[in-house]
Image (spheres, rainbow, N blue to C red):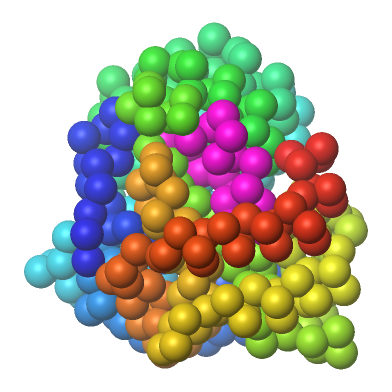
Amino acid sequence: MDEREFGRSGQHASVVGLGTWQLGADWGDVDDKEALAVLEAAAESGVTFFDTADVYGDGRSEATIATFVQSRPDLHVLVATKMGRRVDQIPENYVLDNFRAWNDRSRRNLGVDRIDLVQLHCPPTPVYSSDEVFDALDTLVEEERIAAYGVSVETCDEALTAIARPGVASVQIILNPFRMKPLQRVLPAAREAGVGIIARVPLASGLLSGKYTKDTVFAENDHRTFNRHGEAFDQGETFSGVDYTTGVEAAAEFSGLAPEGVTPAQLALAWIVQQPGVTTVIPGARSPEQARANAAAGKLAPLSSEALTAISDLYDRRIKEQVEARW
């Protein structure tokens, strides 16, 4: 699989990575054996970038990655984690002492002295404008606790503020055929600044797989049940903020655009990979089969101009009005 340079850090990542929220929590149950099998399938398919967070299963996702990586010293995998969601979401909590404490915990979970990439995990908006916050992140680099840092954001405005920071190596943002606003300003700004873009929620929480209907029931401990209206965290993290009924209907139309031999999920991932400025896309997987299928999308031929036009038209007609004003 192709790799792309990871922004200002000089690191590289496969164009399709692996998001590991599913291996920690909030997507129903995944046992340890299956979680390790997912990581193995992804790595064997050419994935060299794993994204996790300290709150995914209260550290379970980080620890699972550590177990896998330590068992496969022959593999080179860039591991990124996130920090900041273990405390009340107020700017005053984003200080160096807390950063060190959170970093200590993640390094223990991951079994490393220095973490490849640490990202602020969708912090309060004022954090992105704080010189003290980014001075503290620079200190973590100087102390060799982390090799590089980035941010995970909810809105395009937050992304643009972060991109202007000289030390930011990457911005993680929701980008998929149901969330196209980052194409307008964020991706061009990132390209100009040399900042990597990590595209998350690439399948709109599974909507773009085309597998769900209006009658689909998700587990009670699945965020697609308990966060449809933003009850637990930002609504945009669930189905990309699209109303479920609208999303199912639009996803059915999207599925009809997939070329022969390409699944709707692979079409969505290929569309993201094809966007100028994207470094890597991080679909999650709950089974080895899903991990392999996702990785295969990184090896597809570029989509035709007709397919790209049809996807944009679907977004404009069915989705744009719901999401662009908010994120």
Magenta stretch in the rendered image: 169-187
Q: Is residue 310 visible?
A: yes
Say if the magenta span includes residue 308. Answer: no
- Quarter of the picture containing the C terminus is top right
Query: Which residue sits at x=39%, y=16%?
Result: 166
Task: Give percent across and percent down for residue 309.
Answer: 57, 58
In this view, which residue lies farthest toward the left?
74
Q: Is residue 149 visible?
A: no
Query: Which residue sits at x=64%, y=33%?
Result: 156
Say if the magenta span includes residue 186. Answer: yes
In this view, which residue lies farthest toward the top?
131
| Total tally of numbered discs in the picture | 0
- Of residues 3 and 121, the one nearer the viewer is 3
Query: Which residue sits at x=41%, y=89%?
Result: 261
Task: Give percent across and percent down for residue 201.
Answer: 59, 59
Q: Is residue 240 above or below residue 223?
A: above
- Of residues 213 and 254, the one nearer the viewer is 254
